[in-house]
Image (tube, rainbow, N blue to C red):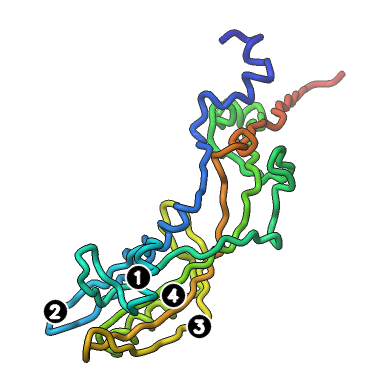
Amino acid sequence: MDEKTQKQREYQITRDTDSVKVNTVGIQDIDEAIFYYFNEVLKPQVTQNGKTINVPLVYGSPERWASMQKDGYYRDKNGKMQAPIVVFRRESIEKNRQLGNKLDGNSPHNYGIFEQKFNKKNAYDKFDILNNRKPVKTYHAVAIPDYVNITYSCIVYTDYMEHNNKIVEGINFASDSYWGSPDRYRFRAMIDTFTTATELVQGNDRIVKTTFNIKLLGYIVTDAVNALAFNTKKFFDKSEFKITQESSGKL
């Protein structure tokens, strides 16, 4: 690339050779944050007949959820009653307008700015130090995402009250913390109320059930219709080059 081309604005702000990715955050990413936190951080377990049992977390499809509400317990695909188990499903998504907003989905006006610390233009070597040359900083502007409050309904099924208490204690302790993978996305999860009941099912068998809701404070960066509007924008500050001159002798 010749010197004239390098000075053209379109080549300065092009994203073709960037290592900075345009990330998207979707509803499924938020669902997966709950799965990760539950299975990798909480890791609920109960002891039954001398054996330690890992308590699974499953997403309740509409058919399964309707069956649970009717029968009062969870069945696997073979029709067998399952316990212990935790089942959850997403109930609603509500916009959180108390936080920052992009203002217009067709043409976002609010951006978050972050500095890329290392790139070809801000190398700082001995030549720069000797000549008091200020490195060029590269900035990226990212559109403010849609902040949302997502509500999940959850049910804990166990055979014994002791097991149910232990699972609920762990979940309650994790309330108001950030759920998700540290390598991806984390969102604050809030739980206010747990409701426990013991129900008779299939003759004299009983099952202990605790219901609660998770309010998860999340955000969405879409790759749908307005994908171009959410692309990060790149720009540079001005380079500074100082020349100092020393003289000796009399004029």
Q: Identity of the amino acid at label 3? A: Thr
User: For mark 2, what is the residue?
Assistant: 51
Looking at the picture, how far across and down is residue 214, in whole percent?
49, 71
Q: Identity of the amino acid at label 2? A: Lys
Q: Estimate the spatial distance between the alpha carbons at disc 1 and disc 2, rounded to whole Å.
A: 29 Å
Question: Seen in the image, is 154 located left or right of residue 146?
Answer: left
Q: Looking at the image, is mark 3 or mark 2 earlier in the sequence?
A: 2
| Mark 1 surroundings within 10 Å by alpha-carbon count, few (fewer than 14), some (14 through 19), many (20 or more) | some
Depicted 4 relative to depicted 30: above or below: above
Q: Estimate the spatial distance between the alpha carbons at disc 3 and disc 4, rounded to whole Å.
A: 13 Å
For discs 4 and 1, the disc positioned in front in the rendered view: 1
Query: Residue 174's mark?
Result: 4
Q: Estimate the spatial distance between the alpha carbons at disc 4 and disc 1, rounded to whole Å.
A: 29 Å
Q: Residue at x 47, y 57 (%)?
A: 30
For discs 1 and 2, the disc positioned in front in the rendered view: 1
Residue 89 versus residue 245: which sits nearer the camera?
89
| Mark 4 surroundings within 10 Å by alpha-carbon count, few (fewer than 14), some (14 through 19), many (20 or more) | some
Q: Looking at the image, is mark 4 or mark 1 earlier in the sequence?
A: 1
* Secondary-structure class at tag 2: strand
Q: Estimate the spatial distance between the alpha carbons at disc 4 and disc 2, rounded to whole Å.
A: 25 Å
* Secondary-structure class at tag 1: helix
